[in-house]
Image: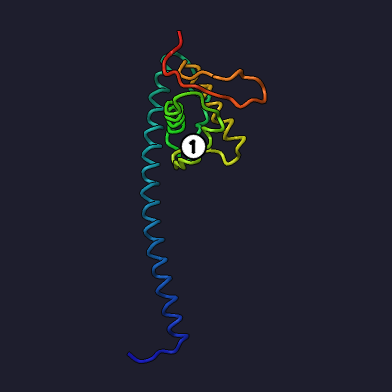
Amino acid sequence: MANHHPKLAALAKSISYRKGELASLEKREDELLQALEAVRREKGNVEQGIQQLNALIEAFEIDPDEVRSIRATPRKSGSAHGAFRGTLVKILKEAGGPITTATILDVLRELNDSRINLPESTRDALDKIGRDIRTISTYGMVIRHDSGARGQPATWRWIGQNQE
């Protein structure tokens, strides 16, 4: 093969890169079109369901247009449903005794589980942990072990069954 001028070689290289970029964009376009079709099918199913429900509502002589819509609340991307509380329960069980909220935060950060979306701010993360543990405690599975005095770190203990 004959020696080519460097500018010609650079152009050929640019063309090669552009062709590769085009191929990946075409692949992405196909994926997006397939996703769009899936969304359209799902939308059609929802619209059909709404029509069926409207027919039921009309049977009760209620105007379906007077029924307000509810804004759907999307999940945080990347988080698995129940992963955070499940991990909290596991940590509380494995602690074998009283454990502070700050210690739980340290354990969660060490786990580095991608399914758990832990807030970046330490204060926000501690609040999230405390909120979820208080929710678990309403089922009688966890009790607050400290006095609950303001300014003291919260300490929790797994009891594992309803207290009645």
Task: Tell me which amino acid carries mark 1.
Answer: Leu
Looking at the image, the residue that sits furthest to the top is: 164
Residue 144 image point, x, y percent:
54, 19
Image point (38%, 47%), residue name: 35
Looking at the image, the residue that sits furthest to the bottom is: 2
Residue 55 image point, x, y percent:
40, 21
Q: Secondary structure at mark 1?
A: helix
Left or right, 159 with respect to 128, comes to: left
* 137 vs 157, nearest the viewer: 157
Q: Quadrant of residue 10?
A: bottom left
Left or right, 133 with respect to 24, comes to: right
Image point (55%, 24%), residue name: 155
Image point (38%, 60%), residue name: 26
Q: Is residue 102 above or below residue 78?
A: above
Residue 90 image point, x, y percent:
42, 29
Q: Is residue 92 above or below residue 60?
A: below
Residue holding disc 1: 108
Quadrant of the image for the N terminus?
bottom left
Looking at the image, the residue that sits furthest to the right is: 151
| Residue 67 appears in view | no
| Residue 118 appears in view | yes
Quadrant of the image for the C terminus?
top left
Looking at the image, the residue that sits furthest to the front is: 97
